[in-house]
Amino acid sequence: MALRSNPTLRQRRLGSELRRMREQAGLGGSELARKLGISPAQMTQMEMAKIGVSPERLRMVASACGCANEPLIDALARMASERGKGWWEEYRGALTIDFLEVAELEAHAARLTFCTTAYIPGLLQTRAYASAVFARLFPPLPSQEIETRTTFRIRRQELVRSGSTPLRTFIHEAALRMQFGGPAVLADQLSALVDDSEQSGISVRVVPFALDTFPGSGENLTFAEGPVPELDTIEMDVSQGALFFDSQADLAKHRVIFSRLDSTALQEEESREFIRSIVKEVKATHV
């Protein structure tokens, strides 16, 4: 069997869950391999997602590890049975892996929650705003790459536009005032954000400057809920790309952060009025 050279995000997550299951059982890789009747090398390759694992083999691993978490086992078995490629694979080679993996994460989420401090969440950006976000990068991107990134981002939005995946977002006032592309682009973006916030399945909550505290450390975060809590994932935007976290400690910490945001952010109608007030201000001052 040929080894995978570039396992996908989902394949790597499945492998890490196998490793986590083994470690929680207190078993070494060689010991578990003996129980399964495979070589230690095969066990390592499964955990590193270099080779696939069938749903049947996954259940054998769970049994050998004494795992009794049936909802988790069933969810992992469904992951193991996935064979098709997502639409984002069309962009492999045209965009960096980070872009593809973010789309892959979103496509498999039961619900998405965003916290942004510098810009409007990508799934709610207008084309002009998204293009301006990419155009401000340094060193500057070629115009064709800006167009490719923008088109990819707009295509990602089909997920929430269709209503298939609920979206909840907490947006700091700083992101509402940050200008990408100038005041006219910002005004149009904020007006579109208000329209989106009135759609079923999309919740927009504002965290104004007036709050005396801001939960978390201020990164732009995505909390992607899985079919079971153990398969939730945190994605963090950094200048070098996207970082993914799935340890139970990281998930627990960020659940608290989002819970605090939920208790402190403006409610939905208050948020809409707040955004409308900024639109009026921008238009009166600049447009």
Image (cartoon, rainbow, N blue to C red):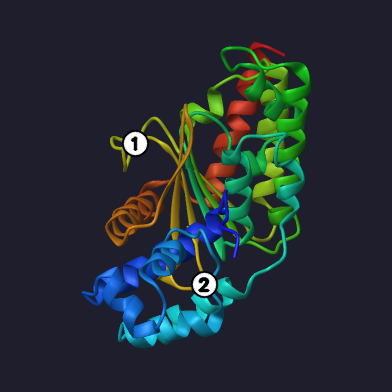
Q: Amino acid at mark 1?
A: Leu
84 displayed left or right of 233: right
Q: Which residue is mark 2?
A: 227
What's the distance in space between the residues labelled 2 and 1, CA to CA? 34 Å
Mark 1, secondary structure of its residue: loop
User: x%, y% of residue 1?
Assistant: 59, 65
Residue 21 lies, with reference to residue 201, above or below; the image says below
Query: Label 2: few (<14), some or many (≥20) within 10 Å?
Result: some
Q: Which residue is mark 1?
A: 211
153 displayed left or right of 14: right
Residue at 36% from the left image edge and 54% from the top image edge: 263
Which residue is at the front of the view, 171 or 282?
Answer: 171
The quarter of the picture where the C terminus appears is top right
Which residue is at the front of the view, 8 or 222?
Answer: 8
Residue at 68% from the left image edge and 21% from the top image edge: 132
Residue 180 lies, with reference to residue 114, above or below; the image says above
Residue at 57% from the left image edge and 66% from the top image edge: 110
User: x%, y% of residue 214?
Assistant: 33, 38
Disc 2 versus disc 1: nearer the observer: 2
